[in-house]
Image (cartoon, helix red, strand yellow):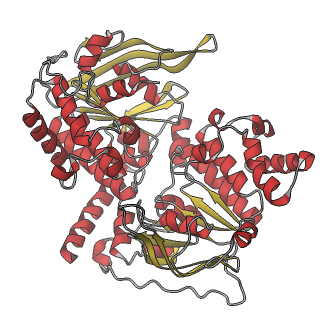
Amino acid sequence: MSTSAEQAGAAGGGRGGFGSAVKLSRSTGGEVAKGDTILDVTDLCVNFWVNDEWFVAADHVDYTLHAGEVLAIVGESGSGKTQSSMSLIGLLPPNGRATGSAKLKGVELVGMSQSRMREVRGNEISVIFQEPMTALNPVYTVGFQIVETLRTHFLMAPTAAKERALELMRLVEIPDPESSFYKFPHQLSGGQRQRIMIAQALACDPKLLIADEPTTALDVTVQAEILKLMRELRERVNAGIILITHDMGVVADMADTIIVMKDGRVVEHGTSDQIFHHPQHPYTQALLAAVPHLGTASDDVTGHPATLVARDDVPVPARDGDPNVTPALLLDDVEITYPKQGRRPAFTAARHINLRVDPGEVVGLVGESGSGKTTIGRASVALLPISGGRLSVAGVDLSGATRADLKNFRRQVGIVFQDPGSSLNPRLPVGESIGEPLLLHEGLKGAEISKRVEGLLDSVELPRSMRNRYPHELSGGQRQRIGIARALALNPKLLIADEPTSALDVSVQARVLDLFRDLQTEHGFACLFISHDLAVVEQVSSQIAVMHMGSLVEVGPTEDIVQRPQHLYTQRLLSAVPVPDPDQQRERRELRDSIIEQEHIVS
């Protein structure tokens, strides 16, 4: 693993600290013009020494990148796309080695000394890392970190460096830069942290920008803003961009050329049009087929603003349902408030929530981060108390439930968390994690619990031998399946699925969604499926509820929400979803811009 200091250098900062005022000259030549060759990679191989043998991570990779061009490297986790790019700036782990050639404006990067590489990092090549919260230093303000980047590489006075930092923050559209300059990373939203990473990466006007999954954990609306920003910056700074991602919608939105990698090898290389419209390799075809397309569950994609009435006061109809059927989940005018803590005042996270999920039904709950989706999900399994209204699950009123009531109630519900890696006990084999609910609620032991655990592993299509492995020994998709198996251990009447596929590769995501549908059909549980990915929600849900700033703004059948959205926010949310087709994505960008313009007119 690379150190935080090395990551800071690649993102823009170096090792010199705030007081470093050493002028570092451009080591790879002067300015570049659009179309000039920035990077020439030939026969690049990356290997890791594991268990007394060399493991191949990337094998004979070749490509050329020009100024102003976006090259997308796509593939599943473990395909070698990230390690092949990290090898360019010497950020491989200690047991890794790179061979072959990678020339930045004619200067060889492979084998470059660490002292020279520190000059290149941030100055000539910058990186936007996948998770800015781990790449930014948590003990320094974001403004300090941008200033450090500038003063490490250039001879600048503190006041001049601060002015340049504020200019960069304005460039990436950070709200109120003068105030945000003094904020720490944890005080910013995910989208704002990503913008700070981009500002830091652009501080020294690099020739090459490596963007490693820059939008993976972002909501579709924030993702659309970040992609728009990167498109504009490409024109402004005339840099070459390597985009590493598994999101084919993002690739369609950004890429000029595409490299498809599998098991460390390049299986296909071509223009965006060639890869999307005429894929040749079976793996590329399978990768594209696995991508969920918004609108494919029905006949068309969302309409245009000209045919829609722009409204921000759409009434949310109450679903009465069959009076003879007890709903699996019923929220009646529910309000959820986080109490006052220290100097932080009480905060109402959800208000006037009216939602019904019938037995055997899957209802999708969508919206941006901070809209209250997860709050509602956690309240539905009694992990959060409600401060108003009435909430019942399978006929059990949770409004005034006691601890004894809740123990019996928890047999009726299950929850699949967004990150199974952090929700599974790292000290327990996954078989024990799956069997724990059976031990606590049904008192099963020995052969009985083993049989049930093996049956649950069979149901999520994992080998029984995997029960003895620990969470860190499994892939993301395997951990997610373990999370689903544990949630279904007690045959719950209601399942809360909180972003169960957000961090998975498209092919793994497709398999998990197929598995989810099969299990839902087999067990017949009701489900509240929480996600910001509308294309995924459309595939599994019969109803969709849209949340915005703590309120439900639109609820209806899936086809109506996707095809005929009435609320202005729903229209904007749908238009922000990238689709894996460059031509269609260009039209959707124009649609989104017109919707945002329409919103400004209405406001």
| Residue 492: x %, y % from top left | 73, 65
Residue pictured at 10% horizontal, 23% vertical: 155
* Count of picture labels: 0
Residue pictured at 65% horizontal, 54% vertical: 514
Front in this rendered view, residue 466 or 394 = 394
| Residue 7: x %, y % from top left | 35, 28
| Residue 124: x %, y % from top left | 22, 24
Front in this rendered view, residue 595 or 198 = 198
> Residue lying furthest bottom in this view?
323
Front in this rendered view, residue 434 or 382 = 382
Q: Quadrant of residue 573?
A: bottom left
> Residue lying furthest front in this view?
342
Residue pictured at 37% horizontal, 35% vertical: 135
Q: Is residue 194 above or below residue 241?
A: below
Front in this rendered view, residue 470 or 28 = 470
| Residue 457: x %, y % from top left | 77, 46
Q: Quadrant of the C terminus?
A: bottom left
The answer to whether 68 appears left or right of 253 in the picture is left
The answer to whether 224 appears left or right of 93 in the picture is left
Res. 213 in view: no
Residue pictured at 61% horizontal, 63% vertical: 496
Res. 154 in view: yes
Q: Is residue 481 above or below residue 311?
A: above
The answer to whether 378 appears left or right of 45 in the picture is right
